Image (spheres, rainbow, N blue to C red):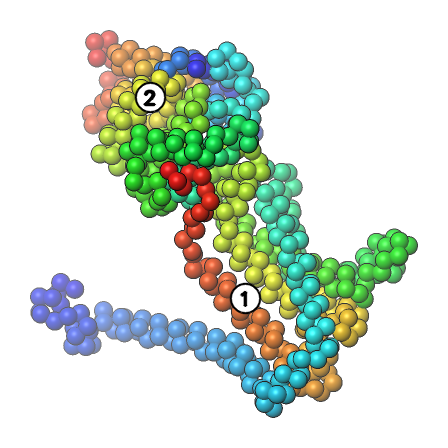
Amino acid sequence: MSLAIQNITKHYGHHLVIENVSFHVKEGELLTLLGPSGCGKSTILRIIAGLEAATCGHVSLNGEDISETPPPKREVGFVFQNYALFRNMTVADNIAFGLTVRPRKLRPSRDQIAATVAELLDYMHLGEYGHRFPEQLSGGQKQRVAVARALAVKPKLLLMDEPFSALDSEVRRDLRRRLKSIQTELGITCVLVTHDHDEAWELSERVVVMKAGRIEREGKPSEILKRPVASIANHLFTGLTAVPQRLTPQL
Amino acid sequence: MKFDASLGVTPEIGAQVFVGSPRIAIKRSTLWFRRSLIGLSFAVVGVALVMPIIAIFGAALNHGFGTYLSSILNAETWGALKLTLLTVALVLPLNTLFALSLAWAINKTRVKGSTWLLILTDLPLTISPVVSGLMIILLYGQRGWLGTQLHALGFDVVYSVPAVILGTLFVTVPYVAKQILPQIEAQGTQLEEAAATLGAGGWQIFKRVTLPSIRLSLVQGVILAAARAAGEFGAVSMVSGHIRGLTTTLPQHVEILYNEYRFTAAYSVASILTLFAVLSLAVKAFFASGLEPAPRPNDPSRRA
């Protein structure tokens, strides 16, 4: 499913959080919103999911305007930064949640749900953890449960808000690679929010660089790295005592 | 520590050896301080809380178990007990319902004016129960604003069972809400948001996510409210009319017995209330100890 964000602006009272942001995500593409904390990237993600209303602007999925659709009807998967797993349910129940809350007519049978859950547990390498509770899992396992839970309902779009930030660096690298392969394999359209540059370059087909509520650059990682904007150059040169005023195109 | 280890003595022995050094002197005084604080806490609890409880049971059983039983097992006490239990049974669901809707209004929907709602919820805690009783008489009494209307319809509220329930309801309003609100606030709305993105509607979210996540504090709040409802005296005393065996609750029954110099009977009835209080504390402590979330055996995905 392709996603289009058109002229999204968001105010909190008099405070302007997002100013006239537009971008496209093609079907099956993984797009990253990159920027420092507080630049409005998470808010955009929440607006796409319907958890927050934009002051003005439109969100459309496959050409259909979903700006007024309530979150439960958007069929958009969301992986939260802290995973937001239901503590009172087992891993299997967490994954099955999106299927078991469906109205009776649309709900798959018990066996079908069980089969889907088993398949996802296996797919996410969580085979033996189905009966555990979230607090008995490591950070990486929790993240995989959160992804499995979001995928169980076959969403049109997968949104991930800093999904790796709560993990230590080794687990992070491993899960990053795994996530990328899952995304390619399923061909699911995906928007990832991160402040981690390496993550953005490694994972995404396209990157939207944000700063203070606006889009600073947009393009393929290679394009952006070829001619970086100041905020990215700063990052590339961390460790140097001074950042050159003008960067040569060859950089 | 290193210094002690190099001398080959454990810190404890070191402390005895180097009594004169200032570091150890501070340690000693903090130890003394700690002990006296702990001692004081136990003394206060013992003198102010435990001894009275023992005294109540002692006085109740002073003339033997037979007398105790006979002063409990009579029509008046039975009537008071029944009214008390009825009050608790009616007040608890109403309070729980109110607390849940209040919590929902304040934290999940960000309704305007919810802050005022929250502040006003505390009113019964800060106001004297006698005044609460008076307010009910003013409103529902024969000359009250609502009382005259209800009288015209053939209902007389004050000095009857409904007044007892109303008074108790007013006094116990904050108890459940005060227990669950902090937990709901601390949890934030992320779990509910996650459920919403997974397709769950409002009722499903409440039933399957919000309610289980506040289960423990809800149970504790209900227990506290039950204990308070059973023991409420001031407000009920103002509005009940003291009709024996009909509109008297256990606390009032105790007062009546005491005023009639039937001390053993008063202590015996008081012991029922005390027992109720101690039991509810025990149940509350049991839930506060934090149970593992119980797996639900009938869930479909369990078979996966």
Q: Which residue is mark 1?
A: B280
What amino acid is found at the position of numbered circle 1 in the picture? Ser
The chain letter for the residue carrying disc 1 is B
Question: Is B300 rendered above or below residue A52?
Answer: below
Q: Is residue B68 above or below residue A199?
A: below
Same chain, labels 1 and 2: no
Residue A200 seen anywhere in this rendered image of the structure: no
Percent across and percent down for residue A100 are 48, 35
Lateral position of residue B270 relative to residue B297, left or right = right
**Badge 2 density bin: few <14, some 14–19, many ≥20, Cα 10 Å:** some
Residue A183: mark: 2
Which residue does the image show at 53% across and 58% down from the upper left?
B220
Type of amino acid at the residue the image marks with label 2: Gln
Q: Nearer the viewer, residue B81 or A115?
A: A115
Residue B269: image quadrant is: bottom right
Subunit that carries the residue with mark 2 = A
Residue B24: x percent and y percent? 23, 72
Q: Looking at the picture, how far across and down is residue A72, in whole percent?
A: 53, 28
User: In which quadrant of the rendered image does the N terminus of chain A lie?
Assistant: top left
> Can you give x and y, in whole percent of width and height, for residue B130 in the image?
72, 67
SS class, disc 1: helix
Local secondary structure at mark 2:
helix
Given residues B169 and B86, the one toward you in this image is B86
Q: Residue at x 29, y 15 (%)?
A: A221
Quarter of the image with the C terminus of chain A is top left
Q: Is there CB contact under 8 Å for labels 1 and 2?
A: no
Q: Quadrant of residue B124?
A: bottom right
